[in-house]
Amino acid sequence: MRFYSTNNPDLTVSTKEALFHSMPADKGLYMPIPLPRLGAHFFETIAGQSLADIGFEISKALFSEEISKSDLEELTHRAFPFDTPVVNLEAGRTSVLELFHGPSLAFKDVGARYMAALMSYYSKKSDQEINILVATSGDTGGAVAMGFHNVPGVRVSILYPSGRVSDLQEKQLTTLGGNVQAFEVDGSFDDCQAIVKQAFTDSELTTHLSLSSANSINIFRLIPQGFYYVRAYGQVRHIGKPVVFSTPSGNFGNLSAGAMVQQMGLPVAHFVAATNLNHVVPSYLKTGIYSPAASVATISNAMDVGSPSNFVRLAHLYRDDYETFNANVSGYFFDDTETRAGMLKIYEQFGYVACPHTAIGILGLQSYLADSNKDVVGVALATAHPSKFKPLVEEVLNQSIDVPERLAVMANLTKQSIHIPAQYEVFKELLLQTVS
Ligand SMILES: *Cc1c(COP(=O)(O)O)cnc(C)c1O
């Protein structure tokens, strides 16, 4: 498999290069070429296959030239010891695809764990230790930390803004120990990101250490997200109706993954791009004008993105053609009042407890079904477990909700972090000490 840059389709690099250096020098984004077509037979016979089975089949189609079948089988099964079940809300019409059964209870586990498994495959073949640096505002850090925990040959340094992540999110970052080191920065998420960016351009560091990023720009976080759209199709295909997916979106990695697997042959009738007040993409779909803006804070904060980094990928997949894009994707957005009302209504109507992001996905689906009046089966992606947003969910539903054991135990663990000022030199000194 080769990867081209969206800024220059003539420039292609290897799988390993795109994996370890997330971004091309021309600041475009990597995209796989050519995208293999999975035959109709594959989609007709997947009903009983797990997420890991499907991941293995698609990985073979993508990477069998550079990685052996047995290695691919081992790494996909190691990455996905959990499934992504479809839960029915309204028979034959509305379902949710639960993506939160992994260790950090959000869909980001899927991308982070597959990327970690691929990196460890390559790192085993070299004696140089790999250093992953990642800045996080919450969910990404937990998925990356857990995905890389105990992976041989890899060290992870996570920078997060002190006092600006939730208690449970902080526990996910700071209690693993071993090869995962958390840096608690006196500053904002932007300060953390600036420190990480400076590290990548510091030749003194990069000559000593093999540095890699685990940010969502990396195409290897997106590729595995296509697997669960296929897994969902396997679970609703028997209904015998066209399938529509509704994806609650921020940076639009999740929806890009869906569009990518659609081009590999998955029969998707339509996508719904559901957002909060950060609605650049729904607005683009309505007007044809794309105008990124500063982000607005909402209760579905993992989707507070004003300038989604994967929009370029999504547009590229639809041939940079507004008509094609519009024929495949509809956009809907909801403010906080509508989101709260939606969470309550979903609970009252279906007995289903949705986190605010998931609620936006379900609301988007319901709006599309009402507007289009088509006889389809709709699948809304449930991106996080509601207990990750416990205080909000309990307030809106006016009742207490359960916290899964694996999250609850974290509350009792002791935080271990290195507290630093938002100064690059301080971080650099400590990084060199901790890795040497
Ligand atoms: C990251 C995140 C999203 C947004 O996903 P994108 O791929 O950035 O569009 C939605 N919901 C939750 C819970 C998230 O953590």
Image (cartoon, helix red, strand yellow):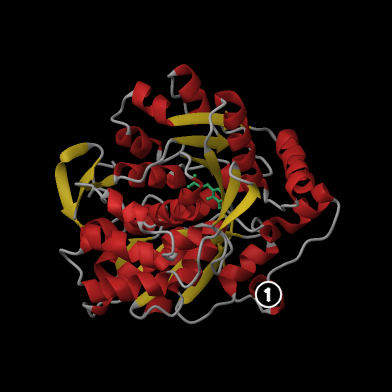
Pointer 1 residue: 405
Extreme residue toward the top, this view:
287
Asked whether the viewer can see residue 418, the reply is no
Q: Quadrant of the N terminus?
A: bottom left
Kindly identify the residue that appears in the image at 36 percent across and 69 percent down. Answer: 76
* Residue 179: percent from left, percent from top: 44, 78
Q: Quadrant of residue 129?
A: bottom left
Q: Is residue 359 left or right of residue 116?
A: right
305 up-or-down from 423: above or below: above
Disc 1 on helix, strand or loop? helix
Tell me the amino acid under the disc marked 1.
Answer: Glu
* Residue 256: percent from left, percent from top: 40, 43
Q: Quadrant of residue 153?
A: bottom left
Asked whether the viewer can see residue 257, the reply is yes
Q: Nearer the viewer, residue 40 or 201?
A: 40
Kindly identify the residue that appears in the image at 23 percent across and 80 percent down. Answer: 127
Q: Nearer the viewer, residue 271 or 209?
A: 271
* Residue 293: percent from left, percent from top: 52, 29
Q: Is residue 360 left or right of residue 130?
A: right
Q: Is residue 78 left or right of residue 249?
A: left
- 10 Å crowding of disc 1: few (<14), some (14-19), many (20+): few
* Residue 226: percent from left, percent from top: 39, 52
80 up-or-down from 342: above or below: below
254 up-or-down from 227: above or below: above
